[in-house]
Image (cartoon, grey):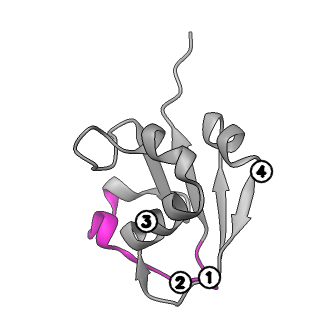
Amino acid sequence: MRVYFYATFREIVGSKHIDLVLADGITVKQLLDRVLLEHPGLRPEMLDAAGALSKHVHIFVNGRGCVFLDRGLDTPVSASDDRIDFFPAVAGG
């Protein structure tokens, strides 16, 4: 599965995307855990003090924000068909 990163996440990972070998049907949360395992520098940027996903982190599955999916982080994803994007909060004026 190819996972895409943007802005500061891209800088931490050192690439605009990574490829992971994953089983179909893993959840977004399991994917997040795997990404953090392979790139621990993302942990303080993505998780809050309690270890939960920061409200400033946006995960998209096929262009749709995870918070808008019926099952949220428990949404299963297909390693062969789904596109996953990680965005930090971006502000500007």
Q: Which amino acid does label 4 sit on?
A: Ser
Is label 2 or label 3 in front? 3
- Left or right, 74 with respect to 79, comes to left
Q: Residue 15 carries which label?
A: 4
Q: Name the residue under label 2.
A: 78
Is the C-beta separation of discs 1 and 2 under 8 Å? yes
Three-letter amino acid code of the residue under disc 1 = Asp
Q: Which of marks 3 and 1 is nearer the N terminus?
A: 3
Looking at the rendering, the stretch of residues picked out in magenta corresponds to 68-82
Quarter of the view holding residue 33: bottom left
Q: Quadrant of the C terminus?
A: top right
Mark 2: few/some/many CA within 10 Å (<14, 14-19, 20+): some
Marks 3 and 1, Cα distance to the nearest angstrom? 20 Å
Quarter of the image that includes the N terminus: bottom right
How many residues crowd mark 1 within 10 Å: few (<14), some (14–19), many (20+)? few
Q: Secondary structure beneath disc 1?
A: loop
**Given the current orientation, which residue lies at the most extreme right position?**
15
Q: Which of marks 3 and 1 is in front?
A: 3
* Neighbourhood count class around disc 4 (C-alpha, 10 Å): few under 14, some 14–19, many 20 upward: few
Residue corresponding to mark 1:
81
The answer for how far apart the CA atoms under marks 1 and 2 are is 5 Å
Closer to us: mark 1 or mark 4?
4
Vertical order, 5 against 54 (above or below) = below
49 versus 69 height, above or below: above
Residue contact between numbered discs 4 and 3, judged by CB atoms under 8 Å: no
